Image (tube, grey):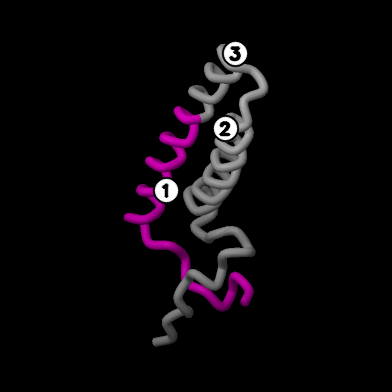
Amino acid sequence: MSRDQVAKVRPFFRGLAGFFLLCTLLAAAGLIFALVTEPFSPSIFIGAAVVIVAGHISGSVLFTGYAPNYLLSAHGPKQRF
């Protein structure tokens, strides 16, 4: 499915993605603090992977209005009037 076949995300969900991106940035700051206090903890690497994926998805939705290409099937089809 390509971007011309799916509808853009509604403004409410773009705002929600912005809030989620803010939370993701705060989590990234927490991970940096945790890395300083507990280096080489396996949970930090798992947390970093979650933060990177969540930031990528929420940033893409916020700034482009579309989910990343691997999640385009989550959108509904374009409405044709």
**Front position in the image: 44 or 62:** 44
- The picture quadrant where one finds residue 71 is bottom right
In this rendering, the label closer to the viewer, 2 or 3: 2
Residue 17, numbered circle? 1
The residue labelled by disc 3 is: 36
Residue 11 is inside the magenta segment: yes
**Front position in the image: 80 or 45:** 45
Q: Residue furthest right?
A: 40
In the displayed structure, 36 sits above or below 53; it is: above
Q: Which residues are magenta?
A: 1-27
Q: Secondary structure at mark 1?
A: helix
Q: Position of residue 61 (x, y in %)?
A: 50, 53
In the displayed structure, 3 sits above or below 11; it is: below
Q: How far, Cα to Cα, is label 1 from label 3?
A: 29 Å
Q: Position of residue 10 (x, y in %)?
A: 38, 62
- Residue type beneath disc 2: Ser
- Residue type beneath disc 1: Ala
The residue labelled by disc 2 is: 43
Residue drawn at point x = 59 percent, y = 74 percent: 4
Whether residue 9 sits left or right of residue 3 in the image: it is left
Q: How far, Cα to Cα, is label 2 from label 3?
A: 13 Å
Q: Main secondary structure of the magenta part?
A: helix
Residue drawn at point x = 42 percent, y = 48 percent: 17
Q: Residue furthest left?
A: 12
Q: Are marks 2 and 3 in contact (CB under 8 Å)?
A: no
Badge 1, how many Cα within 10 Å: few under 14, some, many 20+?
many
